[in-house]
Image (cartoon, helix red, strand yellow):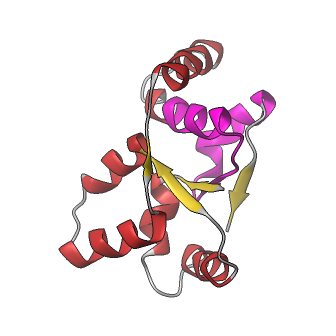
Amino acid sequence: MIQLDTSFLIRSLVPGTPEDGQLRRWLEDRSLLSVSAVVWTEFLCGPLRTREIQLARQVVGDVLPYGADEAALAAELFNRSGRRRGTLVDCMVAATALCREAPLATANRADFRQFESSGLKLIVA
């Protein structure tokens, strides 16, 4: 399973972007793609058209829940990374991927690079 972060999901819906190309390759290969409830929340904040939401929903399938295990790991990542303002959501996204041992596809490697030492595998288009 490959988890998509918000930046990757948004850019994958723009024709001709590297993320669009990567997404198409994964769909051709029938790769299992998913997003966490955290990513889905960020994505739905838009602005989006109904068609974009429907298309994204078809691509990502079920939205993965964010529960107690993810919350505990996200807090640990947040505390270890210096409790920097504005990074909690990134910690939550990383924790969801780490709890499922899934690589995270992102368009913003810099946001997640710090979590590689915790075992997060990043995919950048």
Per the rendered image, the range of residues in magenta is 90-118
Snapshot quadrant of residue 107: bottom right
| Residue for point 58% across, 12% down | 79
| Residue for point 38% across, 69% down | 56
Is residue 99 within the magenta segment? yes
The reply, left or right, for residue 19 in relation to residue 40 is right
Front residue of 122 and 100: 100
In the image, residue 125 sits, relative to residue 38, either above or below, namely below
Snapshot quadrant of residue 21: bottom right
Front residue of 21 and 66: 66
Is residue 11 within the magenta segment? no
| Residue for point 52% across, 62% down | 8
Snapshot quadrant of residue 112: top right
| Residue for point 63% across, 20% down | 81
The reply, left or right, for residue 5 in relation to residue 123 is left
Image spot of residue 101 (x, y percent) = 72, 40
The reply, left or right, for residue 5 in relation to residue 31 is left
In the image, residue 91 sits, relative to residue 48, either above or below, namely above
